[in-house]
């Protein structure tokens, strides 16, 4: 299992009914998780906020391999934030489909996504237990990504984060992207409300 798959399972398992995990937020966090895993297997390095490919990684996870294949190998190389938006497009749906195909998800009542996966839950598999163990151990990268996706109960704000500078760069970019997405949602809500008021009239 990868960090991204662990994150998906945690988000599905622990998303709050009062604050459901948004598909867009989760997709951005999943893209960040993939990039962190690619850094960890030395498939890429980060030159500031630029993603520099270092060759195809020896991984047996098809989604992580697909992420590696999607890297932009042309200089000046892609920025982390651009990668999150490009790779993250509907990525939560991709992970849901892959986990269903692998028997890691089943129908249930625990899913907290607003659409698509609202009746899905993680099956009782070694992968699910591993993801929950990482969460319960307070693994900082998983906790930070889950928090960005909207899952509460992760790493406290005052707890030290990852020491790796590249990982920190990715986590900060994920947080910024999620805030940008929320700003877009709020702007659209205001525009829609104003449009509705025009039609209602005085």
Image (cartoon, rainbow, N blue to C red):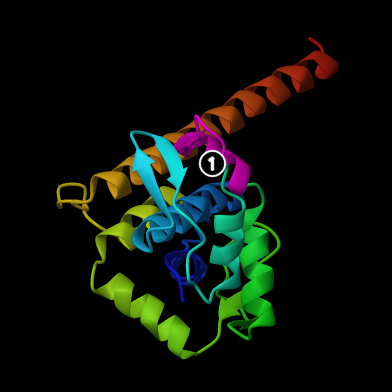
Who's the residue at 36% across and 42% down the image? 46
Determine which residue is flagged by label 1.
Answer: 83
Q: Position of residue 135 (x, y in %)?
A: 32, 71
Who's the residue at 52% across and 52% down the image? 31
Magenta stretch bounds: 73-88
> In the rendered image, is residue 150 in sight?
no
Crowding at mark 1 (Cα within 10 Å: few <14, some 14-19, many 20+): many
Camera-nearest residue between 60 and 139: 60
Relative placement, left or right, of 115 versus 5 is right
Q: Is residue 149 magenta?
A: no
Extreme residue in the top direction: 202
Q: Position of residue 25 (x, y in %)?
A: 53, 47
Camera-nearest residue between 152 and 2: 2
Camera-nearest residue between 167 and 160: 167
> For residue 95, what is the image quadrant?
bottom right
Extreme residue in the bottom direction: 125
Relative placement, left or right, of 106 versus 61 is right
Camera-nearest residue between 1 and 47: 47
Who's the residue at 54% across and 35% down the image? 82
> In the rendered image, is residue 169 in sight?
yes
Which quadrant is home to the C terminus?
Answer: top right
Q: Position of residue 57 (x, y in %)?
A: 48, 65
Q: 23 above or below 174?
A: below
Who's the residue at 61% across and 41% down the image? 86
Q: Position of residue 92 (x, y in %)?
A: 61, 59
Counting every numbered tag in the picture gives 1
């Amino acid at each position: 299992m990868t960090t991204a798959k662990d994150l998906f399972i945690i988000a599905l398992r622990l998303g709050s009914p009062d604050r459901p995990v948004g598909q867009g937020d989760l997709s951005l966090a999943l893209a960040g998780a993939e990039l962190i895993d690619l850094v960890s297997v030395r498939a890429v390095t980060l030159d500031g906020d630029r993603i520099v490919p270092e060759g195809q990684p020896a991984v047996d996870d098809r989604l992580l391999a697909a992420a590696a294949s999607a890297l932009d190998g042309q200089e000046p190389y892609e920025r982390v934030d651009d990668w999150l938006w490009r790779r993250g497009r509907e990525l939560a749906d991709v992970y849901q489909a892959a986990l269903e195909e692998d028997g890691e998800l089943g129908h249930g009542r625990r899913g907290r996504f607003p659409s698509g996966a609202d009746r899905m839950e993680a099956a009782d598999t070694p992968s699910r237990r591993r993801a929950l163990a990482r969460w319960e151990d307070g693994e900082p990268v998983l906790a930070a990504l889950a928090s960005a996706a909207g899952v509460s109960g992760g790493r406290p704000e005052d707890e030290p984060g990852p020491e790796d500078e590249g990982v920190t760069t990715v986590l900060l970019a994920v947080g910024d992207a999620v805030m940008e997405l929320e700003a877009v949602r709020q702007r659209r809500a205001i525009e829609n409300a104003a449009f509705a008021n025009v039609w209602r009239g005085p």
